[in-house]
Image (cartoon, grey):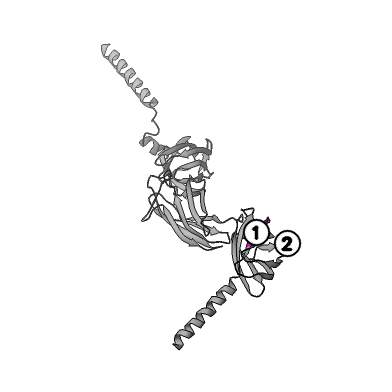
């Protein structure tokens, strides 16, 4: 019995407390304009209603704002009498601060008379903030037939978090393929002002030419307020292949103290084209240069060759050195400059005759045959006599 009485008394106290705390209902009826951005002013209209069965007198209302908002009019309002079941509207002029960030901001309306209560409402601030940016791109050396890593850094510049970030590489028109993964990556959540690296393992196709390739990148994501975004961008990936220029003596007919020719051959044995090839033969005490000493060859394609002829007058027989200064660019316009020494043979006159580089003179043989013929004729005439 005592327990039932105690329970009923407690229930009555709770009911009377609930009634006391719900004398007035409050509601945010409207705010105008609907789209709020930093630096703008807006009007908020609240409706307050006496839900009690008695008159409420001398009611003080006050509006407090969240960071980023400020009340431009008087934040405090007073109502002398509010009859049961009656409602009135309270209008406040507010401003969105210029440094306000995106998101929901609170407006708290409170009242005070014989009892007090408050209620919080939210308005959305649509701040023009730069959020996700593709900050940087780093790559390892991509060489035809080899694997390499591509790292894309994404940076969230906004004051709110981003979610479900999907990054897609379009490799349709590029000589790359993903390794052990797809061409897309996903980030579930990136906090405000956060940064994250996304790595793609790629293989360069064996048939790829060295050079720079544009790769379209599409990024889709949502912010924490469920607004969707779509970014399209281009990144550049460079395929490198080190040129291999093979230089050798192709033909040699150098003869001591004789104007003669040596042919130098340039073969591109690398995986990238060679451009702007220029060759200069440096001077030496072993020869005089009778032709031009500098030749511009230009392009040498992969697995192709070019030759040039130097006209020389060698001063000594034996092995001499031809110092060549060679400059060129690869497909990515990287400069190469080298000086190399080619050893070649200079023949003396006798060696040249033996090798057929010099045709022996037939004048002596002609004289010999003439004398022989004349001798035979004289001999025959003598016998007839």
Rendered position, 117 above or below 45? below
The quadrant of the image that shows the N terminus is bottom left
Residue at horizontal 46 percent and vertical 88 percent from the top: 2
- How packed is label 2: few (under 14 Cα within 10 Å), some, or many (20 or more)? few
Counting residues from the N terminus, which is met first, the one under dot 2 or under dot 1? 1
The quadrant of the image that shows the C terminus is top left
Q: Which residues are magenta?
A: 38-47
> Residue 45: which numbered mark, if any?
1
Based on the displayed image, in which of its 4 quarters is residue 248 positioned? Answer: top left
Q: In x, y percent, where is residue 202?
A: 41, 53
Is 268 left, or right, of 24 in this rendering?
left
Q: In x, y percent, where is residue 269?
A: 40, 45
Q: Nearer the viewer, residue 211 or 335?
A: 211
Q: In x, y percent, where is residue 68?
A: 65, 63
> Residue 73: which numbered mark, if any?
2
Alpha carbon distance from label 2 to label 1: 13 Å
- Looking at the rendered structure, the secondary structure element under dot 2 is loop
């Amino acid at each position: 019995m005592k327990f039932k009485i105690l329970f009923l008394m407690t229930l009555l106290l709770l009911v009377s407390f609930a009634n006391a705390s719900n004398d007035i209902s409050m509601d945010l009826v409207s705010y105008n304009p609907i789209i709020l951005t930093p630096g703008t002013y807006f009007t908020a209209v609240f409706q307050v209603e006496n839900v009690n069965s008695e008159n409420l007198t001398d009611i003080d209302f006050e509006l407090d704002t969240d960071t980023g908002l400020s009340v431009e009019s008087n934040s405090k309002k007073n109502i002398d009498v509010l009859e049961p079941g009656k409602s009135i509207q309270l209008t406040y002029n507010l401003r969105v601060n210029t440094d306000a960030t995106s998101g929901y901001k609170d407006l708290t309306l409170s009242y005070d008379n014989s009892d007090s209560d408050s209620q919080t409402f939210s308005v959305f601030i649509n701040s023009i903030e730069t959020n996700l940016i593709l900050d940087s791109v780093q790559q390892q050396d991509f060489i035809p037939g080899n694997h390499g890593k591509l790292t894309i850094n994404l940076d969230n510049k906004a004051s709110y978090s981003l979610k479900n970030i999907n990054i897609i590489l379009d490799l349709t028109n590029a000589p790359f393929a993903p390794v052990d993964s797809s061409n897309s990556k996903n980030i579930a959540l990136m906090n405000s002002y956060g940064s994250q690296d996304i790595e793609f393992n790629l293989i360069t196709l064996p048939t790829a030419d060295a050079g720079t390739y544009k790769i379209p990148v599409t990024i889709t994501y949502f912010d924490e307020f469920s607004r969707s975004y779509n970014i399209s961008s281009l990144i550049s990936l460079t395929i490198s292949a080190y040129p291999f220029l093979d230089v050798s003596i192709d033909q040699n007919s150098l003869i001591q103290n004789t104007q003669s020719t040596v042919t130098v051959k340039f073969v591109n044995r690398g995986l990238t084209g060679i451009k702007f090839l220029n060759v200069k033969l440096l001077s030496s005490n072993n020869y005089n240069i009778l032709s031009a000493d500098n030749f511009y060859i230009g392009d040498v394609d992969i697995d192709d060759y070019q030759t040039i002829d130097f006209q020389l007058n060698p001063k000594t027989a034996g092995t001499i050195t031809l110092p060549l200064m060679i400059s060129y660019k690869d497909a990515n316009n990287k400069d190469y400059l080298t000086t190399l020494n080619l050893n070649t043979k200079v023949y003396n006159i006798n060696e040249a005759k033996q090798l057929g580089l010099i045709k022996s003179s037939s004048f002596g043989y002609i004289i010999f045959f003439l004398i022989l013929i004349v001798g035979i004729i004289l001999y025959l005439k003598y016998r007839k006599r």
